[in-house]
Image: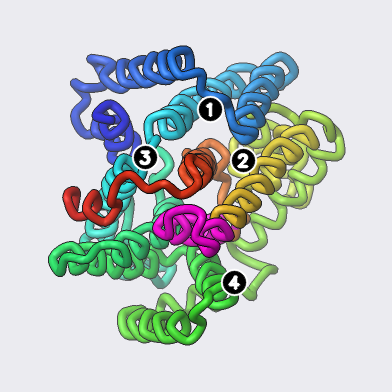
Amino acid sequence: MVVLYLHVIFEYLRIHEIWPILDQLKVQTAMFAALLLIVIGQTVREGVRLSRQSRLLLGFLGLTVFTILVAKNNFYAYEFSYALTLILIGYFAITHILRDERKLGRFLALLVGIHIYIAVMGIGGYSHSQFDERGYASTGVVGGSFLGDENDLGLALVLILPFAIYLFRLTRSAPCRVFWGAGGVAILVTIIFTFSRGAFVGLVAMALYWVVVSRNRGKAICTLALAAVLVIAIAPPQYWARVETIRDIDSGTAELRRNYWAAAGRMFLDSPLFGVGGNNAGVWMPDYAIDFPSEIRPNQWGRAMHSMYLQILAEFGLLGAFLIGSILRINFRNLRQVISLSRSGICSPTIGQLAECLRMSWVGFLVSAAFVSVLMYPHLYYLTALTVVVRDLASADEGAITIEPVAALEKVA
């Protein structure tokens, strides 16, 4: 567990970038190696059977390796495969190590705690900023890698918010409830301060989904009403002005994204089976983004696709879409089954509540991902890992609960 905790801390807080000496000592590489050995050891010792999601992810990894051979820029395709390999080591560490509710509760507490810290940093960045020529300030850069800009930060906070709600609901001691409740508010506030329109759309979709599927719809509506009051109270006029630009599809960044999406469609039509290769959509952008004037098309080299779905189609074609789509379908089916088991009293009610929060997180992520290229981010894979863990815990032993999850959460708060 300690190695997994350190991996998550390094992954999200980029400790090795803050203290370069750690990068020079290859500390993160050593942790990846240790996690891989742990996964292999558990697989051999306990005969762990791979889930369908795991097998499909390995198939997707194989596809990314194959595209190295056919991509225009082989090195970029290799970089994608290498990054995915490291992410999948974290994925398998989660599925193999989190084998009971106590470990799962502690892991979620760490993950949410990290994002609360990031949210507080974002609020601090916003409070020290001035509105710029675009009419908004935002949080600025508070992290690296997949938390490198405001849209990335907004996406990460949207998908983590349901887990903060889960911890708040399960914890019984007053100090812990205050901590998780205040942390959830900080996450919500920071989502607003990112000024990310994609995060706003994901947040709204997640809220509406919660109302639709909630068994206590009145309570859900009241909670959302309170959250809406908070958002209205803290969001500056510039935020609402930026949100309103979602309707403007003929200028600004909306026009750019529309041109990139059209280019993705052309790449897919030219290589519909396995795409142009990992990280190669940007390489081909000057050739396919024909909606731009000819004099600026060379400047589009390396541009992001700004959509996970079109990135999949352009870079990995129908095979990639089939593999990732199958994973998502199985994830939602597993969560539906877990919720049904929980409501029937067959498995732990807390696991059922976590499955409901996971569904909300998936909705927020999948909606926001329509506007961000997130295929190389860990979110898709780690959410899948948590889905696999929840499914395994729900079906472990016909609901024979051997530990008390609430107590575990209170110990780590």
Which residue position is annotated with label 3?
A: 100
Secondary-structure class at tag 3: loop
Picture disc at residue 375: none
Residue 341 belongs to the span the image colors magenta: yes
- In the picture of the structure, the residue carrying the numbered disc 1 is 84
The residue segment tinted magenta is 339-366
Asked whether the beta carbons under mark 3 and mark 2 sit within 8 Å of each other, the answer is: no
Q: Which amino acid does label 1 sit on?
A: Leu
Viewer-nearest of discs 3 and 4: 3
- Look at the image and tell me in which quarter the N terminus lies: top left
**Residue 74, x across and y down, in percent:** 64, 17
Give the Cα separation between the discs numbered 2 and 4: 25 Å
Query: Is 10 drawn above or below residue 117 in the view shown?
Result: above
Residue 356 magenta-drawn? yes
Mark 1 vs 2, N-terminal side: 1
Whether residues under marks 1 and 4 lie with C-beta atoms below 8 angstroms apart, the answer is: no
Residue to which mark 4 is pinned: 246
Q: Position of residue 64 (x, y in %)?
A: 65, 24
Circle nearer the viewer, 3 or 2: 3
Q: Where is residue 240 in the image (x, y as percent from the top left)?
A: 46, 79
Residue occupying the point 40% across, 50% down: 149
Describe the element under mark 1 as helix, strand or loop. Answer: helix
Q: Distance between the residues labelled 1 and 4?
A: 32 Å
- Do tag 3 and tag 4 residues touch (Cβ < 8 Å)? no
**Upstream in sequence: badge 3 or badge 4:** 3
Q: Nearer the viewer, residue 370 or 72?
A: 370
Q: Which of marks 1 and 3 is in front?
A: 3
* Mark 3 or 2, nearer chain start: 3
> Which residue in the structure is indicated by mark 2?
299
Tag 3: residue type?
A: Asp
* Lower position in the chain sequence, tag 1 or tag 4: 1
* Corner quadrant of residue 250: bottom right
